[in-house]
Amino acid sequence: MEVIVAEHAGFCFGVTKAVETVYEQIEKDKKNIYTFGPIIHNEIVVGDLQKKGVRVIEDVSELAGITDGIVVIRSHGVTKEIHKKLMDTGLEIIDATCPFVKRIHRIVDEESKKGKSIIVVGSSTHPEVEGIVSYAQGPVYVVESPKEAADFDGDKETEYVIVSQTTFNMNKFKETIEIFNNNSYNINIVNTICNATDERQSEAEEIAAKADVMIVIGGAHSSNSRKLYEICAARCSRTYFIQTLDDLKLEIPEGANLVGITAGASTPKNIIEEVQKHVRTNF
């Protein structure tokens, strides 16, 4: 039986940069290392960092009374207000926000200052989207799906700039844009889905379309991993979503010829290798 592992599975550039930043601080023997929010959405990585003394905080108030320490801002970024509050603590702040997310912050800031309204296509509760929204200087709307785009009831004379969460489903983004166009909204589109996401989703869909079984590896709270699962499940009815090898309860149908494996942007390489080795050895 053939096993195909997606070439673009695992850590993306932004995640690699963020995780390496924290480990570098540990290696320097720095004391009181904090990350604002989980550095990435992967429980294994976050757990390993906690074992090494790194503490996750969710609110600036948790830093009250601390006069010596380093705070690393997570890869998803934070809101403009939280960023200012962190800087005001006087502690050393290292911003490990993904550069592609920072680019969206700049676009939203600059375009809204010109008087344009902003539409963010993405999940309203995701920390990346919360951060993006905070940089708007005027009206800002979050649209989570093509259905919400169809229900959108805005001023047709207003000029809108549309951006996207970096890990949004590319096909759903295109569908959302088409709806706004068909409804005659005055929109300027900036496709801010990062190339790594686009490549990962396209490759996963291609493998799933020919696979008898598809395995998607990712953190339980990883938005991009969940989107990979949705894409693969639409192409392959036997698609499994797991966090680690321990979660894999694989049922190989009789006559199966191909198992595909892909992983979200916050999945460590060693977990992908463990799953791949297990499948190759046992099936």
Image: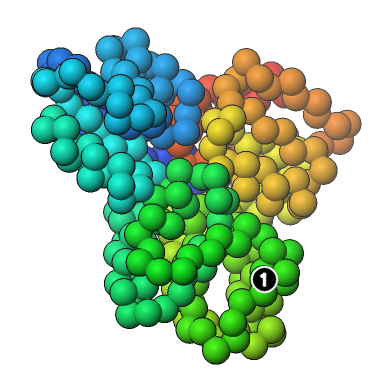
Q: Position of residue 33 (x, y in %)?
A: 22, 21
The answer to whether residue 153 is above or below residue 241 is below
Residue 49 appears in which quarter of the rendering?
A: top left
Q: Position of residue 43 (x, y in %)?
A: 48, 23
Left or right relative to 188: residue 256: right
Looking at the image, which is closer to me, 225 or 190?
190
The answer to whether residue 143 is above or below residue 272 is below
Looking at the image, which is closer to me, 51 or 118?
118
The answer to whether residue 158 is above or below residue 174 is below
Residue at the spot 17% in from the left edge and 19% down from the top edge = 66
Is residue 43 in sight in this rendering? yes
> Which residue in the protein does label 1 denote?
152
Left or right relative to 8: residue 48: left
Residue 3 appears in which quarter of the rendering?
A: top right
Residue at the spot 53% in from the left edge and 64% down from the top edge = 141
Placement of the N terminus among the 4 image quadrants: top right
Placement of the C terminus among the 4 image quadrants: top right
Q: Position of residue 92 (x, y in %)?
A: 13, 32
